[in-house]
């Protein structure tokens, strides 16, 4: 369980990078980053189901991170619904696969944490790259 907690912390750090260090709103993201947000929402749903298998139904750790992500993204209604649906699909998938806490569910939780960390890092890197690139000639990048 200690490894799982460590992996969860790493995953949380990645999600925090998205939620707090990213002023880019969902509607301003390109298609690739929007897909990354959907993938991350799915992974958060998986994480929520796997954590609840061991911590109990009342545990809302990953669900609250998903809520925070949707608040920060301020997505239009359609994309917000897509993110929530992906979260719920990820949750249902893992809940049916791992209904109880055992070695298999703990191992799955570690794997999902690694996947989520990777997704969050890719999204964060993409956002940082976009923030460094000027948007137009008016931003100082013009033909020379």
Image: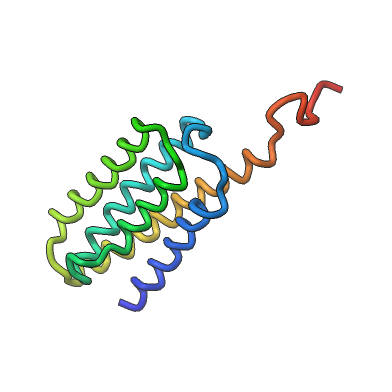
Q: Is residue 109 above or below residue 30?
A: below
- Quadrant of the snapshot with the N terminus: bottom left
Q: How is the image coloured?
A: rainbow
* Whole-percent x, y for residue 119 in the image: 44, 49
In the displayed structure, would residue 79 be above or below residue 109? above
In which quarter of the view is residue 57 placed? Answer: bottom left
What residue is shown at x 56% (from left), y 48% (from top)?
Answer: 22
Give the number of marks: 0
Return the x and y of residue 12 as percentages of the image width and height: 43, 62
Rendered residue at 57%/45% (across/down): 23
Residue occupying the point 27% across, 66% down: 107
Q: Quadrant of residue 95?
A: bottom left
Q: Is residue 66 above or below residue 143?
A: below
Q: Nearer the viewer, residue 105 or 56?
A: 56
Name the residue at the right extreme: 144
Looking at this rendering, what residue extends furthest in the bottom direction?
Answer: 2
Q: In the visual, does 102 lie left or right of 9?
A: left
Q: In the rendered view, tell whether residue 133 sits above or below residue 18.
A: above
Q: Quadrant of the C terminus?
A: top right
Left or right: residue 132 versus residue 63 is right
Identified at 42% across, 37% down, the residue is 75
Q: Residue 113's spot in the image, x, y percent?
A: 36, 60
Residue 63: % across, % down: 30, 56
């Amino acid at each position: 369980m200690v490894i799982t907690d460590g992996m969860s912390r790493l995953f949380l750090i990645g999600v925090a990078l998205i939620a707090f260090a990213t002023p880019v709103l969902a509607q301003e993201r390109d298609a690739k980053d929007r897909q990354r947000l959907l993938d991350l929402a799915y992974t958060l749903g998986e994480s929520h189901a796997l954590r609840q298998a061991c911590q109990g139904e009342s545990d809302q750790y990953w669900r609250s991170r998903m809520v925070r992500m949707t608040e920060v993204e301020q997505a239009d209604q359609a994309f917000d619904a897509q993110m929530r649906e992906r979260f719920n699909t990820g949750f249902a998938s893992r809940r049916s696969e791992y209904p109880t806490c055992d070695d298999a569910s703990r191992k799955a939780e570690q794997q999902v944490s690694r996947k989520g960390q990777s997704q969050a890092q890719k999204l964060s890197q993409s956002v940082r790259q976009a923030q460094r690139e000027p948007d137009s000639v008016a931003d100082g990048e013009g033909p020379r």
